[in-house]
Image (cartoon, grey):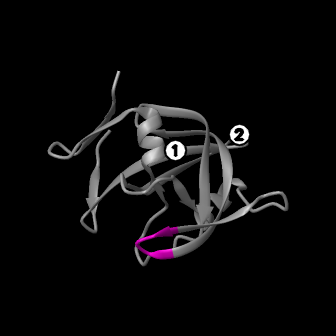
Amino acid sequence: MNIEIKYGLPFVEVVVCYRGEQLHLKHVLLDTGSAGTIFSADVVDAIGVKVEPEDVLNKIRGVGGVEIVYSKYFDFVRTGEVFLEVFEVEIGKMNYGLEIDGIIGFDFIRAAGLVINSKELTLSARV
């Protein structure tokens, strides 16, 4: 899988599936400094991801400040050939001032065994 540099940062494309509905996300930041994976509430709303009464709201902190999020289990999250089933992600507003559909965080990177080649701008899974 190829990494594209936008805003001086590494971005990848991701396909997500929630309750059988798939969505192709073209602007997902690959972020080893983010503990968790998060997707934009506005973007994933297209496949029915919405906050529900039983969802617990949490605060996350990052370089951009504090954000309120909720968690959902997706049927799968895939980037390139790397595919994780029943994967928990956070959903938030993600108003960061740039075009971004989500962030692939260290939780996904570690679980998938991703190898980032920053020289060749490629992403693969360790076999």
SS for callout 2: loop
Label disc, if present, on residue 99 of the rendered structure: none
Q: Could you tell me how many numbered marks the image carries?
A: 2
The residue carrying mark 1 is: 15
Mark carried by residue 20: 2
Q: Main secondary structure of the magenta part?
A: strand
Q: Residue visible at 46% across and 53% down? A: 35
**Residue 59: percent from left, percent from top:** 61, 68
The span shown in magenta is: 61-65
Quarter of the view holding residue 21:
top right
**Magenta span has 54?**
no
**Separation (CA) of disc 2 from disc 1:** 12 Å
Q: Amino acid at mark 1?
A: Val
Q: Is residue 10 left or right of residue 98?
A: left
* Residue 95 visible: no
Residue 106 in sight: yes
Q: Residue furthest left?
A: 119
